[in-house]
Amino acid sequence: MTTTNRWRLDRQISAAVLVAVTLQAAAALMWAGRASARIDEMQKRLEAQAPVAERLARLETQAEATRAALVRIEAKLDGVGR
């Protein structure tokens, strides 16, 4: 007695299942499209901010040099005042 349990794929699909699968696929494609658009927008913003970041780094370096010069000037003034 051998009983084989083979499952079959029935060719009848209800309209509700077909509509549900179609709507899910459409929603997934819309979500992926919006995600791609957001990623593209963030990429553009990042590229636009690259020069600003470089300028900021230069300004920080200049501020450090100015601060060091100020410390030297204050040290000289403290030595002259004694």
Image: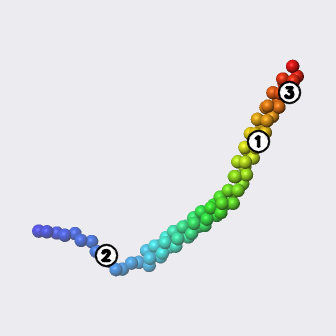
| Residue wearing tag 3 | 77
Residue 50 appears anywhere in the view: yes
Q: Quadrant of the C terminus?
A: top right
Between the residue at mark 3 and the residue at mark 2, the CA separation in whole angstroms equals 93 Å
Report the amino acid beneath label 1. Ala
| Residue wearing tag 2 | 9
Q: Nearer the viewer, residue 31 or 9?
A: 31
Percent across and percent down for residue 43 are: 62, 61
Tag 1 and tag 2, C-beta contact below 8 Å = no
Q: Quadrant of residue 31?
A: bottom right
- The label shown at residue 52 is none
Q: Outermost residue, right direction?
A: 81
Percent across and percent down for residue 14 are: 41, 78
Q: Nearer the viewer, residue 44 or 79?
A: 79
Q: Nearer the viewer, mark 3 or mark 2?
A: 3
Please tell me whether mark 2 sits on a helix, a strand or a loop: loop
Residue 38 appears anywhere in the view: no
